[in-house]
Each structure stands twice: as structure tokens, then as C-alpha cells.
Amino acid sequence: MEYPEIDAYASMDSPIHRFDPRAKIVSFTLLIFSFVFVNEIRIALLGFLFSFLILLISRLPLAFALKRIRMVFFFLFPLLLVMPLTVEGREVLNITGISVSFDGLIFASLIIIRALAAVTLALIMLATTRFDITIKALYALKVPGTLVQMLMFTYRYIFVITDEFSRMWESMECKGFRLKANYHGLSIFGNILGMIIIKSYDRTRRVYESMVAKGYSGKPNTLVHLHMSTKDYVLSTCMVGIAIFVHVYQLMFTV
Amino acid sequence: MIGAVEAIRVKGLSYSYSDGTKALEDIDLTINEGEKVVVVGPNGAGKTTFFLHLNGTIKNPGGDVWVFGKKISDLKIEERIHQVGVVFQDPDDQLFMPTVFDDVAFGPVNMGLDEKEVEMRVHKALSKVGLEDFEEKVPHNLSYGQKKRVALAAVLSMEPRVLVLDEPTANLDPKSRADFINLIIDLNEIDGITTIIAMHDVNALPALADRVYVLNKRVVAEGSPREIFSDWSLLKENSLEAPDVFKLFKVLNCFGYSSDDLPLSFDEAVEILTRTIEGTEGHIHLHIHEHTHKEISDVMNSYNHHRNGKE
Ligand SMILES: Nc1ncnc2c1ncn2[C@@H]1O[C@H](COP(=O)(O)OP(=O)(O)OP(=O)(O)O)[C@@H](O)[C@H]1O
Ligand SMILES: [Mg+2]
């Protein structure tokens, strides 16, 4: 079974991997917000190039990163086709009465470039830290406990549930079941999903019982050992600086 | 035992699940400190349900459970988990934290221990179960046997005085099974932890039991492993089995081999055989009489209830 492992390359070594996870989360989040709110296409492009540069520095295998970034691109690609037709603006082409607008084209590109920059950054952030450490960093950053616990359990049990699903699927295939898009196939598929939900519900109860057996009383309980060094401060200051600079620059540019 | 300390005392415990399933009826039992007790019973007999009462996970106003003389409902959480630790059947249910370290540290952190102490206990518990370098591992990358051992470590780190294990040997390979059994025996004999175990694995039972309770909604019988395994009708009525060696020696008895003690384990069998053969000048005598066949088929029928349906 292939797991959806985002942190498969977390044990590599690079300046980004060595970046303190708390500082990483804060600076990357700021950068993401900063890039997403840019509304000048040239600056957005610079932001994207910057994200890509960080991707190179992080030494994550490009195939691994591109596979995920590509999905976002395919998801947003239709905008490039739709927006030039729907957004009012300077006309570049007129195909038999349908006008293709330049502004629509620019606007669609802006959205896509911003999204790609944000996704690249988010990917680097998550892929260069082991997920359990990301969770601990969130906890250390005083993100609300319920939220952290939800993330934690999702991460822990997504694998158990994937295994459960694939075991059920295999046993159905062994009994000759082939998924077809007809009434029978879909209703069986629905049954499986239902079973997964019931099993998960049962499991939730047992997990809760075993948590109570270990004295759980509602607080997430872990020990967090993270230490910021000078280089973490320098690196995060640079990144926050870039996040702010982008907007200052944009103000000067547009005024 | 004289002067023994009562570790667990249960009186008149009954329990029904919310859907009406009657799981336990009027359970009475006492387990002393330092004892090794095994609870046997068919599937659905209520063993797991009973264990959930021992650490207060199921809150049951209708039954009384005392732990070292205190009512379990009166204990504070930290106290309760320090007295009784339960290792459940499925390790995936018990390893819910992102890493092995966090899982083993979970109990101690809840007990309010300081960081140094928590870390020390995690190291100690993991080395007890033979997984020293596993702290940073993620549970989903462990094998089933390793998960089982981490689950045990996660309970040992709370340093409980009573250790309750639900089917510890199920699904383990022979080596892991033997290791796990020896580990439990060591915990009992060296660390003085009282162990209460539910298991279907009768061949491993004698090593883990000073005393056996047969549970089938109610306590059906209580006694030493030898007493329980000698009671044919008891075993049959409760869908239980005797160890293979024990049954084999029963058959040998029909062939005229005479020994007072029937062995419960392989090692014991070797020992007894050696002793008898030495005592009878170097050989034993087996024979077949007319009534032998009848006796053997009686023995077979009394134990092999899984074949009865076909006969
Ligand atoms: N959450 C639940 N809700 C309703 N009924 C339950 C629940 N859990 C167990 N039962 C029922 O209670 C009875 C006792 O179950 P329990 O799990 O305690 O048996 P067990 O002796 O541990 O069995 P096994 O050897 O199969 O593990 C069974 O009839 C079972 O169906
Ligand atoms: Mg059970």
C-alpha cells in the first residue's frame, strides 16, 4: 500500500531541513500570505521564482515536488480558458464575435502564479519536517489544543484506515468483485465506505478508552524539545523581511 | 497465602452494554499482590469488558472494584493509572501519538511527572521490552510484534503495580511469542508486578498462571491450571482446550504409562519422562489391551470438541 506521505523526504539535509520548525512555520506562513495578496503580476512572478529557489535549496527531489505542484496547476488551469472570455478589458483577439480579453488573461495568470507560489512554499514547509515535529511545533506555538489533536489523530490514523480500506478491497477482489459504474458496483462501493466509517467509529471508541486508561483528561500531552539558534533567527528575519518588502515594493510600484 | 496483600477485589460486578447485551453477571474474585492470574473463556465471554472495569474505563455504579483496598471510583486519575495498567488487544488502538517516544511518554506526562523523570521512564520502559532505539520511530512503520511491545512499554512507563494484558500472544510469531511470555514472567517475578492475563493460547497458559479463572459471563470456575485442565466437562461446556502435551500424556496413560503428574508444558513433559524412565530402570512399558481403544476414544472425545460435530 502506498501511503500519502508528505514527509517522505524529511530526513534529508539542507538549510531548510535544519531550519527550526517553529520559525519555519511562522516565516513560511507569512511568506505564503504575503505572496497570495500580491496583485501585480511581475511581483507575483518574482514571488514564484523565489519559492522555486527555496525548493532548489531544500534539495527535495524535483519529481516529488512537481508531482504535487502540477496537481494544483491542473486544478486551476481552466481559469486560463475561462477568464479571458469573461473578464472585461482590452481585447487581444476576436474569434467570430467572442472577444478574448488581455486583462482576463493577466488576471488568470496572476491567480495561478500566486497559487503555485503558495503551494510550493507550503509543500516545502511540510516536506522538510517530519510531520510529528510539525505537530509539536504547532503545539509549541500555542495553536489551540483541539486543532493540534485533530491533526495528530488524522496523521496517525490515516494510515490505519488506508490499510483497513485496502484489506477490505483486496478481500472483495478475491471474491471476484470488480468495480463497474453500474448500480450494483456503486452500491457495493457505498457499503464499503459505510463499513469504513463504522469501523473507524468503533476504533475511535477503543482509542479513547486506551487514552483514558493512560490518564488522558483532554489536554494534548507531549514533551517538545526545540531550540532556536542564531541562524534560525537570521533566516526567519530574512524571510519575514521579504514578505514585508514585497508589499512595500508593490505600494511604491503602483503609486 | 498468609499475610498476602489484596491487589484486586471484585464483588457482585454485573454489566450490560447499552444495546442490552449482558456481558458480565455477578463477578466475585480476589487477586493477591504478586500473583500471576489468567482469565480464560470463549469469545464473547466478557474478558475484555471485565478488564475495562479494572482501571475504571467503564464507570459502573452497579459493581464494586477495589484496588489495593481502595474503591476504584474514589481514586484520582494519576493514582488509578499508577495502580493498574491495561494493555489492550489491538496495538493500533493504543499507539495514538505521532512517535513511539510520545506514546510511551503519554502516561507519565499525564501523571504530572517532570521532563527528566518522563524521559528516564521512557528509556527504561523501552529497554525493558527490547526496543531501545525506537523512540523516534513512527508507529505505522512498525511490525505488529513491535507495536505490541511498544503498547506494553507505554503501560510499563506508568510503573503500574498490577498489569492487565488482553491476549498478549495473539498473532505473534513463535519467537516473538516466547520472548513476550518471558518478558511477562520477568515482570512478575523480578519486578513483582501482579499480572492478570486473558488468553486463548492454552499451550502458553501454564507458564503465565499460578491460578486460572474461567469466565463465561460469570465466574464458572477457579483453580490451578492443572485442576482446570483436568476437568473435562468444564472445558467442554466452555469451549476450552487443554494443552497438547497434557492431552498426549492422558493418552499415554491409557497405554499403561503411569505418572501422577501430567505435564502442562513441553519442558515439564521432558522432565517427567526422564524422571519416570530413570525410576523404572531405563525403560517404560506401554501396551494395548482390549479396553485401551475405548479409553483412548473417550479421551479424544472429551478434548477434541471441534471434531464432535462430525461424529
Ligand atoms: N461496545 C459494545 N457494545 C455492545 N456490546 C458489546 C460491546 N463490546 C462488547 N460487546 C458484547 O459484550 C460481550 C462480551 O464481549 P467481550 O469483548 O468482553 O468478550 P471477550 O471475552 O473479550 O471476547 P474475545 O475472546 O472474543 O476477545 C459480547 O457478547 C460482545 O458482543
Ligand atoms: Mg476480548
Image (cartoon, grey):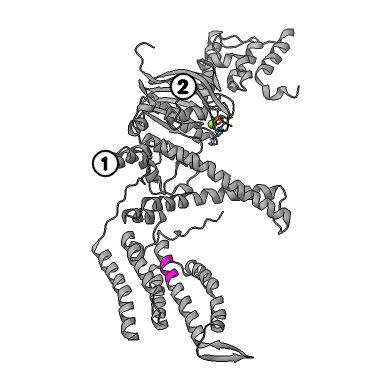
Amino acid under disc 1: Asp
The prevailing secondary structure element of the residues shown in magenta is helix
Q: Judge the density around disc 1: few (<14), some (14-19), many (≥20) Cα neighbours within 10 Å.
A: few
Q: Is mark 1 within 8 Å of ligand 2?
A: no
Residue shown at 43%/73% (left/top)? A117
Instruction: Please state which of residues B168 and A86 is positioned toward the viewer in this rendering.
Output: A86
Q: Quadrant of residue A221?
A: top left
For label 1, the SS is loop
Q: Which mark is residue B37?
A: 2
Is residue A217 placed above or below A19 in the rendered structure? above
Marks 1, 2: nearer the viewer: 1
For the residue marked with disc 2, what is the amino acid?
A: Val
> Residue B50's mark?
none
Closer to the camera in the image, B19 or B67: B19
Q: Quadrant of ligand 1?
A: top right
User: Label 2 crowding class (10 Å Cα cut-off): few <14, some 14-19, many 20+?
Assistant: many
- Residue A178 relative to residue B3: left or right: right
Q: Chain of mark 1?
A: B
> Residue B223: image x %, image y %?
51, 14
Nearest the eye: A7 or A99: A99
Query: What segment carries the magenta color?
Result: A118-123
The chain to which mark 2 is attached is B
| Element on which disc 2 rests | strand
Query: Is residue A90 visible in the rendered structure shown here?
Result: yes
Q: Is residue B13 magenta?
A: no
Residue B289 visible in the displayed image: no
Query: Where residue B228 sits: x, y (%)?
Result: 55, 16
Residue name at image x 47 percent, y 68 percent:
A65
Q: Is residue B112 left or right of residue A81?
A: left
The C terminus of chain B appears in which quarter of the rendering? top right
Residue named by callout 1: B114
